[in-house]
Image (tube, rainbow, N blue to C red):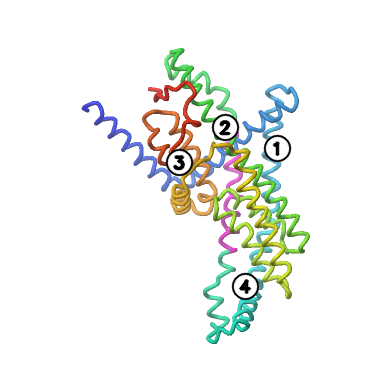
C-alpha cells in the first residue's frame, strides 16, 4: 500500500499535466497529433508498396511520402479554391432556403409564419458554413507546421530501436516484450487509419460523382468536406448528406427531384460504407462504446474545435488499443469498448505487463 501512494500521486500529476498541456498547448499539440496520424498513414502505405512490388525500404518511403504530400496538396488546393465561393454564396443559399421553408409552411397551413428576418436569425446558414470553412482554412494554414513535425518523425523513427534498447538496459526479454506490444499497437492503429481513410476517399469520390450528375454547385468542396466528416462517427455521416441535400433546396427553383436523388444516393453511400464495408474491413479493431464516442466528440470538440471532432475517434481508438496491452490499464480499455470483450486487442504473449 505504501508503494502504491507515490505511484498514484505520480499518475495524478502526469494526468494533470497532460490535461493542462492539451488545453493550453493546443497550438503546439494539435499539429503534432495530425503529424502522428500522417506518420501512421505513411507507414501503412510503405507496407502496401512493399507488397505490390519488391521495393527497397528507401523507395517505399519516398513513394509513401510523395503520395501523402500529393494528397494533402489536392485537399489544400480544393479547399482554397472553393472556400471563398462557399462563404460568398451562403447568404444567397440562406435566402432561398428561407423562401422554400416559407412556401412549405404555407402549403401545410401554418398560420403564424415567422418573418424572413426571424427565420434568418434562427437559421444562420451563413454562420454555419463560415464556421466550417474557417475550421478547414485553419487546418490548411497549419499544413506547413504539420509537415515539419512529420519530417522530424520520419527522421527519428530510424533511431527508435536503438533508443529502446538503451532505455531498457539491454534486457533481451523486456526488449522483446516491449517490441511485441509496440508492434501490436502500431498494427491495429495502422489498420484503423488506413481503412477509415480509404473509405473516406471512396465516400467522397462517390458523393462527388452524384453531386456532379445532379448539377450541384461546388461539388468539389462538398466532396472534401464529406471526406473529413466521415471521420466523425454517426454525426459526420448524417451531415455528409444533409448539407448537400440542403444545398439542393437552396440552389434549384424546383428542388424536389435533386433533393430526393442527393438524399437517397448519398445516404445509401454512407450506410453501405459505414455499416457494411467498414465492419468487414476493420474487423474488431474498432469496438468503441457509443456513449464513449459521444463523450469523445464532446470532449475533443470543446478542447480543439472542429479539428478535435475529426480526431476524437482516432485518438480514442488509439487509447483503447494501448490500454488493452497492459494489465494495469486494461479496465480502462474494457470501459471504452462496446461490449467489454477486448481479447482480440490484448498482447499475444498474454503477459500484458507494463514495461517497467
Give me the C-alpha separation between circle 1 and circle 4.
38 Å
* Residue mark closest to the camera, 1 vs 3: 3
Residue labelled with disc 3: 339
Picture coordinates of residue 189 (x, y %)? 55, 35
Nearer to me, 52 or 258: 258
Residue 67 badge: 1
Question: Mark 3 falls on what kind of element?
Answer: loop
Q: Are marks 4 and 3 in contact (CB under 8 Å)?
A: no
Question: Mark 1 falls on what kind of element?
Answer: helix
Residue labelled with disc 2: 152
* Residue mark closest to the camera, 1 vs 4: 4
In this rendering, would 258 be left or right of 302?
Answer: right
**First of labels 1, 2 by sequence position:** 1
* Residue mark closest to the camera, 2 vs 3: 3
Question: Mark 2 falls on what kind of element?
Answer: helix
Nearer to me, 206 or 224: 206
Within-10-Å neighbours for mark 1: few <14, some 14–19, many 20+: some
Residue labelled with disc 4: 94
**First of labels 2, 3 by sequence position:** 2
Residue 320 badge: none
Asked if residue 132 is among those painted magenta in the image, a careful observer would answer yes
Rendered image quadrant of residue 90: bottom right
Nearer to me, 327 or 136: 327
Asked if residue 263 is among those painted magenta in the image, a careful observer would answer no
Question: Mark 4 falls on what kind of element?
Answer: helix
In this rendering, would 56 be left or right of 318?
Answer: right
Give me the C-alpha separation between circle 2 and circle 3.
39 Å
Task: Name which residue lies at 53% across and 75% down.
Answer: 121
Amino acid at each position: 500500500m505504501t508503494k502504491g501512494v507515490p505511484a498514484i500521486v505520480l499518475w495524478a500529476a502526469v494526468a494533470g499535466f497532460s490535461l493542462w498541456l492539451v488545453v493550453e498547448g493546443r497550438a503546439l499539440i494539435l499539429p503534432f497529433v495530425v503529424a502522428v496520424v500522417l506518420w501512421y498513414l505513411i507507414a501503412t502505405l510503405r507496407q502496401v508498396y512493399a507488397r505490390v512490388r519488391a521495393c527497397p525500404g528507401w523507395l517505399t518511403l519516398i513513394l509513401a511520402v510523395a503520395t501523402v504530400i500529393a494528397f494533402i496538396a489536392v485537399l489544400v488546393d480544393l479547399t482554397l479554391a472553393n472556400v471563398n465561393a462557399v462563404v460568398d454564396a451562403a447568404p444567397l443559399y440562406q435566402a432561398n432556403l428561407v423562401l422554400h421553408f416559407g412556401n412549405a409552411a404555407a402549403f401545410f397551413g401554418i398560420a403564424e409564419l415567422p418573418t424572413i428576418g426571424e427565420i434568418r436569425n434562427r437559421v444562420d446558414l451563413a454562420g454555419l458554413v463560415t464556421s466550417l470553412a474557417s475550421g478547414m482554412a485553419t487546418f490548411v494554414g497549419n499544413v506547413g507546421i504539420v509537415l515539419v513535425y512529420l519530417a522530424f518523425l520520419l527522421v527519428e523513427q530510424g533511431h527508435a530501436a536503438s533508443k529502446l534498447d538503451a532505455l531498457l538496459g539491454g534486457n533481451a526479454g523486456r526488449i522483446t516484450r516491449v517490441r511485441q506490444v509496440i508492434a501490436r499497437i502500431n498494427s491495429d492503429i495502422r489498420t484503423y487509419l488506413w481503412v477509415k481513410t480509404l473509405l473516406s476517399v471512396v465516400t467522397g469520390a462517390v458523393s462527388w460523382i452524384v453531386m456532379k450528375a445532379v448539377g450541384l454547385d461546388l461539388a468539389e468542396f462538398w466532396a472534401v468536406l464529406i471526406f473529413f466528416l466521415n471521420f466523425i462517427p454517426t454525426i459526420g455521416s448524417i451531415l455528409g448528406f444533409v448539407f448537400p441535400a440542403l444545398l439542393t433546396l437552396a440552389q434549384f427553383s424546383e428542388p424536389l427531384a435533386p433533393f430526393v436523388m442527393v438524399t437517397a444516393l448519398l445516404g445509401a453511400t454512407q450506410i453501405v460504407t459505414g455499416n457494411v464495408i467498414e465492419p468487414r474491413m476493420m474487423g474488431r479493431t474498432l469496438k468503441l462504446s457509443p456513449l464513449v464516442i459521444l463523450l469523445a466528440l464532446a470532449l475533443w470538440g470543446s478542447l480543439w474545435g472542429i479539428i478535435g471532432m475529426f480526431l476524437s475517434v482516432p485518438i480514442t481508438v488509439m487509447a483503447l488499443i494501448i490500454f488493452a496491452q497492459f494489465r494495469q490499464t486494461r479496465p480502462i480499455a474494457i470501459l471504452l469498448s462496446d461490449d467489454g470483450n477486448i481479447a482480440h486487442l490484448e498482447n499475444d504473449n498474454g503477459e500484458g505487463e507494463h514495461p517497467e
